[in-house]
Image: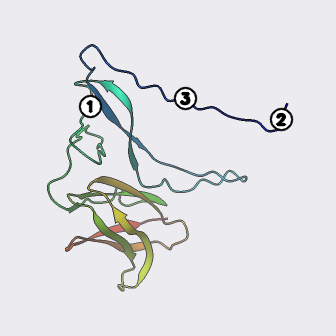
Amino acid sequence: MSDHSHVLIVFVEQKVTTAPAKTLEYPVRYRVQAVDKYDDVSVLSDFVNTRGGSLEAGSGNRNATNLSETDEGDSELPVEYSLSQNYPNPFNPGTNIKYDLPFGGLVTLKIYDILGKEVYTLINEYKDAGRYITGFNGSDMSSGIYYYTIRAGGFTQTKRMILLK
């Protein structure tokens, strides 16, 4: 008898004799928030969109590649770029910024102080088309008026937000 272990992997091809069941993938959307050993909580991450499992036909949408549903339940991809007003505003210390991307591409979302000095880069990466919400925690910043600017696919827009402590 040998001391070596062997693993046998068998692939079985199964033929379907009945009509194939119609299945659809469904969107999975989640956010991550870290808690350290001192119970300090981080800002929520951007939404992560993926696909999972299978549902019976009619229960999902297979046409979209990145479903990022809004609170209103709209699962359609946006048709134009947009940057929404942060909520809440004024905020202390956390707020959320929502934006829509009709096409995938490089996205930057930056925070500037009242003098136009860049104070924080929230996003500087490739994003798929979809609807996104990103959190911002201003706990290390002083009270005041700040501006946030998004740049994506030739689109640029700036909005004002107020941090009140």
Query: Which residue reaches farthest left?
Result: 79
Q: Nearer the viewer, residue 75 or 10?
A: 10
**Residue 27, horizontal then vertical, whole percent:** 34, 38
Badge 3: few (under 14), some or many (20 or more) residues near its Cα, within 10 Å?
A: few
Mark 2–mark 1 contact, CB under 8 Å?
no
Badge 2: few (under 14), some or many (20 or more) residues near its Cα, within 10 Å?
A: few
Q: Quadrant of residue 38?
A: bottom right
Residue 2: assigned label: 2
Residue 14 sits above or below residue 164 on the image? above
Q: Nearer the viewer, residue 115 or 81?
A: 81
Query: Which residue reaches farthest front?
Result: 1
Badge 1: few (under 14), some or many (20 or more) residues near its Cα, within 10 Å?
A: some
Amino acid type, label 3: Val
Left or right: residue 6 compared with residue 79: right
Front tag of 3 and 1? 3
Amino acid type, label 2: Ser
What is the spatial separation of the Cα atoms under label 2 and label 1, in whole angstroms? 52 Å
Front tag of 2 and 1? 2
- Residue hosting label 1: 60
What is the spatial separation of the Cα atoms under label 3 and label 2, in whole angstroms? 22 Å
Front tag of 3 and 2? 2
**Residue 128, horizontal then vertical, whole percent:** 30, 57
Query: Which residue reaches farthest top?
Result: 18
> Upstream in the sequence, badge 3 or badge 1?
3
Residue 87: assigned label: none
Residue 68 sits above or below residue 14 on the image? below
Q: Quadrant of residue 56?
A: top left
> Upstream in the sequence, badge 3 or badge 2?
2
> Upstream in the sequence, badge 2 or badge 1?
2
Query: What residue do we see at 19% from left, 74% from top?
Result: 154
- Residue hosting label 3: 10
Query: What residue do we see at 40% from left, 57% from top?
Result: 134
